[in-house]
Amino acid sequence: MCGIAGFVGARGADARARLTRMADLSTHRGPDERGLWLGEQVGLACRRLAIVDVAHGQQPMRDAETGTTLVMNGELYGHAALREALEARGHRFRTRSDTEVLLAGWLAWGEAVFERVDGMLACAIWSPARRELVLARDRFGKKPLHYARHEGALWFASEMKALLTLPGFPRRLDPRASEHFLLFEHVFDPMTPFEGIAALPPAHVARVRADRLDAMETRRYWRVPVGVEDGTPATIEAAAEELGALLDDAVARRTMGDVPVGALLSGGIDSSLVCAWLRARDAFSIGFADPYLDESAHQDAVAAHVGATLHRFDFDERLEEVFASYPEAQWLGEHADPSFEQDILLRHVTTLAAERGYVVLLGGEGADELFRGYRHHRLHPHLVRYAARSDLEEIPESLGLDDDDFAELAEAEARARATWGTSAHLLAPSFPLGVLVEPRLFEPLAREVFVSPPAAARMVNVPALPAGVAPESLDALAYVEAHTRLPAYILRTLDRYSMASGVEVRCPFLDHRLFEWHARLPRALRDAAPGDKPLLRALARERLPPSIAAREKQPFAAPCVLSEALLADDGRERLAALLAPRAIEALEVVRPAWVRAALERRARGSPDADHPVERAEARLLERVLALRLLASVFIDEIATYEAAHLARHGVARDDARRA
């Protein structure tokens, strides 16, 4: 695992210094080594977290015969098989590194190597013969890769802070992306929150020649499979048996490396199964004093069952430490996140692991997307069945929904009508916390909030549904989520906050072979009991304590300490500064008058706080605050955060610029 950076087309004596500073801003991602390579108007850099062939495998890695040079962030889980195939073609390896396997694979197969690779990666390859830079990203977008054009050159980096701190780079939030965030709570690739910076989407390869930097060519090399069923296996028992074998292999592949592998353990079925399959010696978790949030008893049961030593980060005992980390959360996460107060806890639990000698952990991410385990998957059939109704203010008893179910259903339906002009659109439940602007109920709110009518729905970067897949199906919903919320939120936060501790988290459920297998299952098995994951429960009954196999899903949540502090009397001054009219005007999306009025309404309290419009306004206000927190870090105070980051990792800011 690493942080990578580079450029094509930069001229001048300070190119090396700029590249060195970009690498140093990724020191948290790769604390073990720093490597640089510079050619004619091209440079590549890498900060390495040494996991495979620790003594060798330094980057950038260069082929002596062709001069082709590579930097890579990530791991190739199946590199042993690729190594054998390449050796059969006559290649002789110098190291045991998976980086060298990727370089040799590129020279042998070109872009087709990425279709052969099983792993998580983002990489850059410089071909001197073609004077061409190639950028590539793994299938699901587990590892990040961003790029920008600046001063006649193309620059790229794992994290956007390395681009935003380039001398003279214009730092500005992108109004289109801000609108997108307000509507969907996330920004989807290739957009980023910042104007002039793009993210290479998952499963894409990009090529750009040194003499045509404005003409980047991109190609998608893989799509999440959907609806290709072949009818086997026909029973849940047979399917669970096949799934067990696939998961066993997926976990085994993700233990590759020269370092010990631990487990992240929430106490839910997904992470508990991974912990059991890993036979983890050490597991790492989070605990809360609030019994509504705490899952410690379930974590203890799983750890005892598999024989693991459990190390728990106690939120309440270390509250001061948690609170002190909030200002840095936006710097690390690089996106506006209303939920950053819970996301930043991943940094604390992975730091706990690093302190005990673990730089690789396995987690359960991806299982809910694959097996349709979210609450809105359960609501989706109700949404489709109820789509024709126009009155969503009363709960139809025939649906059997409780108040919370209905509120989420009504909000999703309202959003679908407003943003796509159709009821029960496949995207509707994919963003259960999205902005609500249903014509009848929410148009007045939309007119009050937005400077101009929202148009962000047209920006969603989702491949067209394969032929034969109905837009209202669960297959379509899962397809959309795998291309949007999974990389834009779940994998992004997992990467940023774990790598902030110098820890790599691997996800067995995000093995592409599992997704391809699931797509071939009969629809009756794929769609069985949405929200309940019956296939995983069948495995859990074999591998986990009965109490874990039977428990309902408990979404991870944490106390919103910073939000409460900002809304308290002693935090009002800071809140007023963040949401001042001039600061809101700079966003170019939201009307300052609405922000002022919404704050006043919130201060007074409302007897209708649970009404959909009131809930929509509260969520909008949280998102506006998240945008302003992001702007305060990366626009207003970026020099302060940059200096603090470099100092924290033992690099003086001036030294980084002179290197």
Image (cartoon, grey):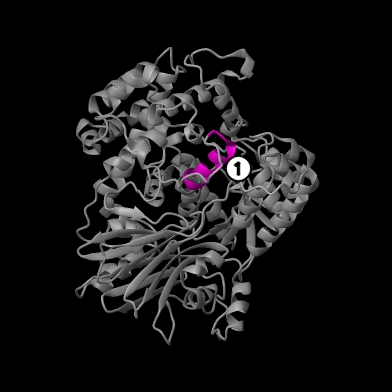
Residue in the foreground of this view, choosing between 512 and 34: 512
Name the image quarter holding residue 281.
bottom right
> Does the magenta run of residues contain 210?
no
Q: Position of residue 601 (x, y in %)?
A: 33, 18
Residue in the foreground of this view, choosing between 569 and 106: 106
Q: Position of residue 629 (x, y in %)?
A: 33, 40
The residue shown at (80%, 47%) is: 542
Residue 316 visible in rendering? no
The magenta-colored residue range is 472-485
The residue shown at (46%, 73%) is: 110
Q: Position of residue 418 (x, y in %)?
A: 39, 26
Q: Is residue 394 above or below residue 40?
A: above
- The residue lying furthest to the front in this view is 467
Q: Position of residue 337 (x, y in %)?
A: 41, 41
User: Identity of the amino acid at label 1?
Assistant: Asp
Q: Is residue 620 above or below residue 36?
A: above
